[in-house]
Amino acid sequence: MCGIAGVVSLDGRPVSADELDRMCDAMTHRGPDDGGVYLGAGVGLGMRRLSIIDLKTGRQPIRNEDGSIWVVLNGEIYNFKALRTTLEARGHVFYTATDTEVIVHLYEEYGARCVDHLRGMFAFAVWDGRRRQILLARDRLGIKPLYYAEVNGRLLFGSELKVILQSPDVERRINWNALSRVFTFLTTPAAESIVAGVKKLEPGHVLIVPVDGEPRTHRYWDVTFVPDRGRSEAQLVDRLRELLEESVRLHLVSDVPLGAFLSGGLDSSTVVATMVRTGARPVKTFSIGFPEADYDERTYARRVAEAFGTDHRELVLEPAAVDVIEDLAWYLDEPFGDSSAIPTYMVSKLASEDVTVVLSGDGGDELFAGYDKYLVEQRERSYGTPPPLVRRALALMGRMMPEGMRGRNFVRHVSLAGWPRYLNASTLFRQDAKAQLFEPEAFERLAGSDPWREEADCLARANGHWLSAVQYLDLKSYLPLDILTKVDRMSMAHSIEARVPLLDHPLVEFAATIPPELQLRSGTRKHLLKLAMRGILPDEIIDRPKRGFAVPLGRWFRGELTGFVRDLLLSQKTRQRGIFNPVYIEQLLEQHMRGRPLDLQVWTLLSFEQWCRTFLDRTPSPPASTLPLRPARVLAASGI
């Protein structure tokens, strides 16, 4: 696991070693163990290394035999040993034992199609000195991040947004389209960042940039939901078990201590159980709990830990945990409306005291239809859609009802039909609410943005059964933009690597063949996964009610943190930005104090304001708690 960075001069100017060092220093937390820089004619590659595989000789950047091709990698290639055997048989000579080196030789064999052969989580850059071009690639599901920007005749890229912001060429201006999406779906878009001009390489994509040609991006992988009704339920269960064990076994490859996040839910429990069944003993497990009983899952986590004999540790979060909000802004890189970043940050801190690698159960809800919203959509579809005349009347009624009035949201919801109704359920602020939230000038800047249309286009691409369509949407949107972003940033904040075995792409492709009726059956979510784990996990874990990774923010914001919220959101500094209407924010806070559940709305406002203070109001610098910087090695090169 590493952080990568780079500069490619498209106009012949030399690349500065000092600039690369600054870029790498901004993400020392991603790689506290080592650093390296390759400098060539008009190109520089940099990295920070968290040593996990090949601790002695795995330093990056990595080259091919004649030094014409160089690579930096963030992530892990789980099938690298098999790939190395094949490549050596073809005559390639290796000088390290690291997984990174297979990418160099795969590129020599297959060019940009090298990604087709990789099984893992990755974001990497390959500099081809002969062709004078760079290849940027990101893994299929978006487990690892990659930002880039073309500015003033140069291509800049890095594992985090703050890496690119080290360049004086990048102007810190808000991307209003991205901001609109934050206040609609909690995160920035798949291909854009919160900073105007800085982009994200989308999952399953490669970007090729020739020094003297046009950049070109193409998708190299996508998942297609096609139900396999040729196999029986029992055969599908057997195949699922096989793939789970294979994936977990591959994800256990490590030269450093390894553990697992354990919430006590089905997905994390499945990963822990499979770790033990494949011989990983003793497994260290880590959980977060709350004093509020209805948010606390430690009882379930302890039950799993006892059943599989894990070395279990847990931490209880109090309202004071919000004291880390400034650190969160630094590590998250962008405004982020999912408050579960707090417990993820804290459980990562807990795990970092014992291990360097953790396995998590993320991805299970998307693959096996585990979200409650899927059940809601199934139920609403069974009711049918009211006639257009009735829906128009309901829409009018909803507009006439004052904001905060009981039943208003329900009336407005049932006035919609099709995908807009589905998207409405997960929308933070609808367009009319944004018109009140934002000052008029700021709202005008949002006018061209339509986050609903972007999500609806994704749903339309899926075709087939409605359940497959919403699973596809979550795999393309919610999973990479929220869940995986959160886990990557919060684990890397504490210099640990989080692996997600449920997102091994052969397992993902198999899950897309499970018939919808075997995903949701008789109101039961994850039907096939539960069958596969029956007899392995305790029944109480399989049959327990689902509970999301929620934080009791509502109670905290109405209690000990009331003053903190008001001081931040209604401060003179916040008002002077001219973005939000303070009168409307005051109304939101009053409604929240009266019991209306506006936790996410308030948290998203807090997250954005803290991001502004961290990245717009001053030159971004790491928290005092960040690990000390270590000097990077410089690999001087010329000509190529």
Image (cartoon, rainbow, N blue to C red):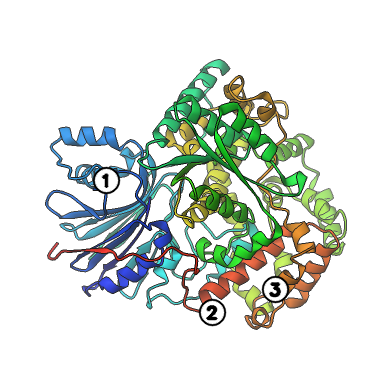
Q: What residue sits 17% from the left and 49% below the top?
A: 64
Residue type indicated by callout 1:
Ile
* Residue assigned mark 3: 569
* Residue assigned mark 2: 617
Q: Where in the figure is residue 397, as x and y percent of width and height? A: 86, 58
Q: Where in the figure is residue 76, as x and y percent of width and height? A: 37, 44
Between 561 and 353, the one nearer to me in the picture? 353
Residue 621, above or below 131:
below
Counting residues from the start of the chain, the first of labels 2 and 3 encountered is 3
Q: What residue sits 67% from the left and 35% below the top?
A: 300
The 10 Å Cα crowd at callout 2, few under 14, some 14 to 19, many 20 or more, is: few
Residue type indicated by callout 3:
Leu
Residue 492, above or below 608:
above
* Residue assigned mark 1: 103
Counting residues from the start of the chain, the first of labels 1 and 3 encountered is 1
Q: Where in the figure is residue 589, as x and y percent of width and height? A: 78, 68
